[in-house]
Amino acid sequence: MLKSPKLLTPYDIEKPLVLPCNASPVRVGAVLAHQTKDGSDRPIGYASRAITTTEQMYAQIDKEALAIVYGIKRCYQYRNHIIHTDHKPLMYLFNENRSIPATASARIQRWALTISGYTYQIRHRTGTKLGNPDGFSRRLQLEPLESLTAMIYVRVGPNKGTCPVDHLHIPPRCTQWLKQECKRSLEKRMFL
């Protein structure tokens, strides 16, 4: 199931990349995906994290901006990508062709300066079309903070090997299941 093409598709340097990002009152989520010719997204990787107590007090625009900054920082090693957000004001604030607005809050200005070092385009997509990151941003935090950290690898293509992507925090309740799955499949051992 971990390597199922229904969950993740192999990275292809020829296909365009999109990075839909979203925030909820408790989490931020981002999905790195290939955009197909029919306009649908095929996920390559997922990223999600709980927001801190302080971040929970942010205005919604700041939470959405946090999701974008988090997504970009998690996927920085990939080439140019198109960021999708359901928050229209961020298209102006994080526009790649404009200077950082002087009227923006200090936090937004700092984040705009941070992401200006990356190559991206930002586009609006309605919330109903942001299913993947929306689901990851709303997932409940049921696990304790103690977790196993594992290196994740992404398939570069059929029979082209793998390359490291990032660290993933695996909840303790999933650790035992993952170890059993890895023992059953040599290909899944890379997750340990």
Image (cartoon, helix red, strand yellow):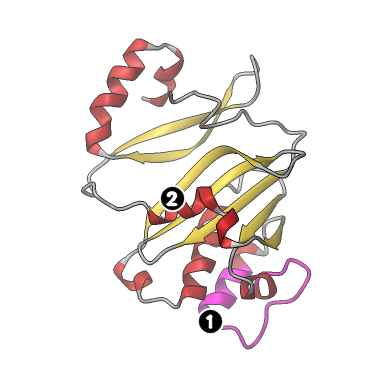
Q: Nearer the viewer, residue 59 or 42?
A: 42
Q: Residue furthest front?
A: 128
**Whole-percent x, y for residue 126 in the image:** 61, 62
Q: Quadrant of the C terminus?
A: top left
Gap between marks 2 and 1 measured at Cα = 27 Å
Label 2 sits on a secondary structure element that is helix
Name the residue that disc number 1 marks: 106
What kind of secondary structure does the magenta stretch mostly adopt? loop
Left or right, 24 with respect to 177, comes to right
Residue type highlighted by circle 2: Phe
Pointer 2 or 1: first along the chain: 1
Residue at 67% over, 70% down: 91
In the image, is residue 110 part of the stretch drawn in magenta? yes
Which residues, given as a range, are shown in magenta?
94-113
Identify which amino acid the numbered label 1 is placed on.
Ala
Q: Please give the name of the residue rendered at 28% of the width and 18% of the height, measured from the top-left corner.
A: 180
| Nearest to the observer: residue 64 or residue 77 | 64
Q: Check disc 2 and report the residue beneath it.
A: 136
